[in-house]
């Protein structure tokens, strides 16, 4: 149990806040590349700041403050130009660094500048960095770089703080109950003739490594050398669960929009089927949470079960009422790591998983993960799985 003040310190995302300054040391996905094909000017909210993402007529990305320096109109109405983004109201034009490069009618272009942040494209996603220079390298995660897999992106906005989403990733035991007993009850309640039964957890453990945490577990029916126990399930600090087995796997990235909203980005890859062509650009689906008539999330698959659990804690989980127990030791570890790395930032040091060495980023960042399908859902009962083109068999 923590105090209200400690909970605020852990969960705030804005500039100048204890945790917000840590979050600004990382790159965050804010849109899909194909989104800018549909509309090259898009409003974005990230780390409690309102911004505008654009691609100019030369193809250069820009990420600038929302308001024009002239009369304060939103630049989300802006018009792409060869030299930047032109304000729809009076034509002031901003380059990707936020400089005003044109002031129609005025005798001279004043040396004005609005806030601007770095934006880069990788793996079909647009990534933003909002921290100090020199900026770290955008991590070239393996799946973002590989082009031999059929890849897909889903994005779903969630009305809750990002930390409670990531707490779920460091909580192995919830699989047995949320994705087992509760999923089975949901199926029976909705007349779905598909039973769900999960294996009982025997032991759990956590290992800190260079880029984050390995979550390990041994469940009933698995041998002691099962790689879900000997290798584990990697979580990249502070925001990405590496999820899936074999050659079908993906990333779950929890993007802090502000203190009470998160963008859940799921990036998936699967082997190409015979005769299948890989799209030139990674496709994206923008989803919304489905609710029933009583305001509860309809959790018909594993990702929705997780997202429902996060949202059901409220916009900002009141941790002053929590009673953490032995199965929550991963959650406690994660919270402590957030605090420790935020303190490193205050001392002027780089936090965990900030890459500046090109050799560590090339050809891509690889992390070991379990390769065999664990017997999490057993006894011949069909597991809840998703289309491999959009997702992979989930182990939460």
Image: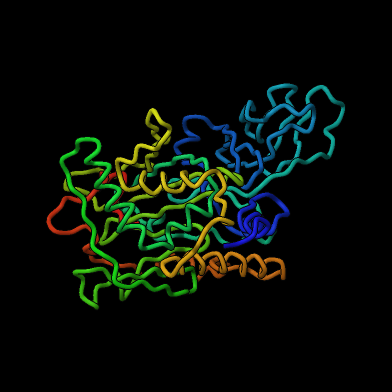
Instruction: Name the residue at 62% across, 58% down.
Output: 10
Question: For the view shown, which residue lies furthest in the right direction?
Answer: 107
Q: Relative to 138, say whether 127 is above or below.
A: above
Foreground residue, 191 or 341?
Answer: 191
Q: Quadrant of the C terminus?
A: bottom left
Total numbered circles: 0
Instruction: Name the residue at 42% across, 53% down.
Output: 252
User: Where is residue 51 drawn, in percent x and y?
Assistant: 64, 39
Question: For the view shown, which residue lies furthest in the left direction?
Answer: 380
Tell me if 280 is positioned left or right of 50 in this view.
left
Q: State the colouring used for the structure image.
A: rainbow
Q: Which quarter of the picture shows residue 136?
A: bottom right
Instruction: Name the residue at 41% across, 70% down.
Output: 214
Foreground residue, 141 or 231?
Answer: 231
User: Where is residue 159 drawn, in percent x and y?
Assistant: 52, 40
Instruction: Name the residue at 67% across, 66% down.
Output: 345
Q: Which quarter of the picture shows residue 231?
A: bottom left
User: Where is residue 170 drawn, in percent x and y?
Assistant: 43, 63
Foreground residue, 178 or 370?
Answer: 178
Q: Quadrant of the N terminus?
A: bottom right
Residue 353 in view (yes/no):
yes
User: Where is residue 183 drawn, in percent x and y?
Assistant: 28, 47
Q: Relative to 150, say whether 135 is above or below.
A: below
Question: For the view shown, which residue lies furthest in the bottom direction?
Answer: 224
Tell me if 331 is positioned left or right of 132 in this view.
left
């Amino acid at each position: 149990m923590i105090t209200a003040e400690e909970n605020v310190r852990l969960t705030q995302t804005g500039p100048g806040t204890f945790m917000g300054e840590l979050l600004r040391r990382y790159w965050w996905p804010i849109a899909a590349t194909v989104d800018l094909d549909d509309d090259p000017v898009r409003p974005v909210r990230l780390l409690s700041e309102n911004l505008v993402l654009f691609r100019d007529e030369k193809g250069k990305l820009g990420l600038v403050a929302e308001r024009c320096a002239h009369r304060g109109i939103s630049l989300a109405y802006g018009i792409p130009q060869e030299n930047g983004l032109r304000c729809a109201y009076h034509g002031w034009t901003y380059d990707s660094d936020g400089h005003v490069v044109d002031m129609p009618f005025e005798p001279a272009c004043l040396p004005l500048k609005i806030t601007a942040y770095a934006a880069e494209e990788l793996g079909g996603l647009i990534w933003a960095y909002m921290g100090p220079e020199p900026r770290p390298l955008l991590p070239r995660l393996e799946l973002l770089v590989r082009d031999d897999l059929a890849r897909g992106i889903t994005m779903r906005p969630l009305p809750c703080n990002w930390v409670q989403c990531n707490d779920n990733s460091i909580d192995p035991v919830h699989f047995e109950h949320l994705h087992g007993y509760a999923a089975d009850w949901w199926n029976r309640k909705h007349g779905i003739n598909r039973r769900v039964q999960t294996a009982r957890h025997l032991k759990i453990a956590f290992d800190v490594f260079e880029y984050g945490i390995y979550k390990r577990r041994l469940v009933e029916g698995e041998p002691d050398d099962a790689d879900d126990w000997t290798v584990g399930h990697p979580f990249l600090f502070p925001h990405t669960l590496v999820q899936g087995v074999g050659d079908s796997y993906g990333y779950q990235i929890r993007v802090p929009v502000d203190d009470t909203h998160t963008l859940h980005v799921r990036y998936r890859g699967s082997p190409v089927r015979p005769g299948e062509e890989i799209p030139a650009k990674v496709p994206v689906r923008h989803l919304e949470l489905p609710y029933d008539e009583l305001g509860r999330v309809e959790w018909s698959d594993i990702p929705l079960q997780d997202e429902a659990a996060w949202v059901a804690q409220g916009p900002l989980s009141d941790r002053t009422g929590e009673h953490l127990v032995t199965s929550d030791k991963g959650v406690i570890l994660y919270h402590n790591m957030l605090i420790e790395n935020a303190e490193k930032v205050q001392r002027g040091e780089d936090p965990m998983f900030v890459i500046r060495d090109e050799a560590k980023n090339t050809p891509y960042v690889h992390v070991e993960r379990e390769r065999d399908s664990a017997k999490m859902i057993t006894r011949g009962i069909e597991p809840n799985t998703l289309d491999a083109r959009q997702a992979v068999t989930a182990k939460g």
